[in-house]
Amino acid sequence: MTEVIVLGGGTPTPTEFRFGSAHALRIGDEVLMFDCGPAATHKLVKAGLYPTQVDNLFFTHHHFDHNIDYPCFLLCRWDQAAGHGSELNVYGPKLTEEITQKVIGVGGAFESDWQARVNHPYSQQVFVNRGGTLPRIPPAPKAKDVGVGEVASGKNWQVTAALAEHVQPYLDSLAYRVDTPEGSVIFTGDTQPCDTVRELARDADMMLCMCWDEQSVMETANEANGQCGTTGAAQLAQDAGVKKLVLVHMGPGLSKDTPFDRHIEEMTAMYDGQIIFSEELMRLEV
């Protein structure tokens, strides 16, 4: 079975029910993770998964609501693995390698943490009690800056990236397509409707698309540039031939509009596929 778990379905504005961006994609016995926003590690565990099950993490871009839990995830995964399993593969646009080094490398912000866990006798004992064998090896995630094209592949999956249009030139942004035997999934990250994402999503089974707010509200507030709203996401999905549209990265204003019947009615006028307004910890079979 291939399923998507929405870990973070919100924006930089924290609300009671949504905060930040993070998603898990379970493909058989493998788990891929896309973005690592606020409390992503905690929400992953709430979803019944564990950091040590994730061997591949993909960043769409490096706004804090997409990466702030990265230090927690890195250290938690390394600590709980107790020396077993493979190192984490991390992919993302420019800055992915630099941020990883600054977080966990020698001289990085959290070097003192892992140095203490590697060298202090008490921490070494905990490591041994968890099944580890001394000497303990420092964390060494394999981070890689990536661009357009094939990014990574596994036993039953292939990930391809395309440029997304968000806040260039300050940050590069990518959208990802995951092809599996059971279907294809698009993670747009943050983007406005654009040709590159449209072509990446061509005939996909499911697209998780950012949806900041109702389109007319965004346009009135001059917030439509670099982002998708309700009808923008619907038109993008229709033009790409996407079968199922899942709306994520929903702002606090739109989130209050439950039930979403009014928006669905407006969107179905231009999109003939299934529309889902996501909730955090929602599970969606591809």
Image (tube, helix red, strand yellow):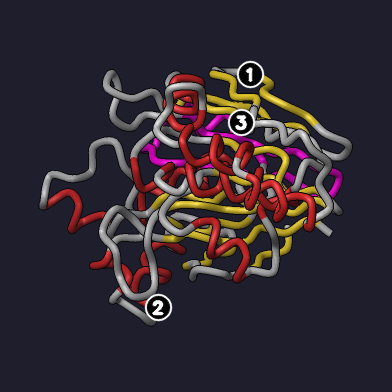
Q: Amino acid at mark 3?
A: Val
Q: Secondary structure at mark 2?
A: helix
Q: Position of residue 259 (x, y in %)?
A: 38, 82
Q: Amino acid at mark 1?
A: Gly
10 Å crowding of disc 3: few (<14), some (14-19), many (20+): many
Relative to 263, say whether 147 is above or below. Answer: above
Q: Badge 1 is on which residue?
A: 149
Q: Most extreme residue toward the left, as rendered?
A: 221
Q: Is residue 205 visible?
A: yes
Residue 192 falls inside the magenta stretch = yes
Mark 2 or mark 3, whichever is nearer to me: 3
Point 78% across, 29% down: residue: 153
- Measure the alpha-carbon separation of dots 1 and 2: 37 Å
Point out the tag, 1 or 2, that comes first from the N-terminus.
1
Q: Secondary structure at mark 1?
A: strand
Q: Which corner quadrant holds the N terminus?
A: bottom right
Residue 261 badge:
2
Horizontal side of 249 relative to 32 (left or right) equals: left
Magenta region: 174-203
Residue 246 falls inside the magenta stretch = no
Q: Badge 3 is on which residue?
A: 90
Q: Position of residue 267 (x, y in %)?
A: 41, 61
Q: Amino acid at mark 2?
A: Asp
Residue 32 badge:
none
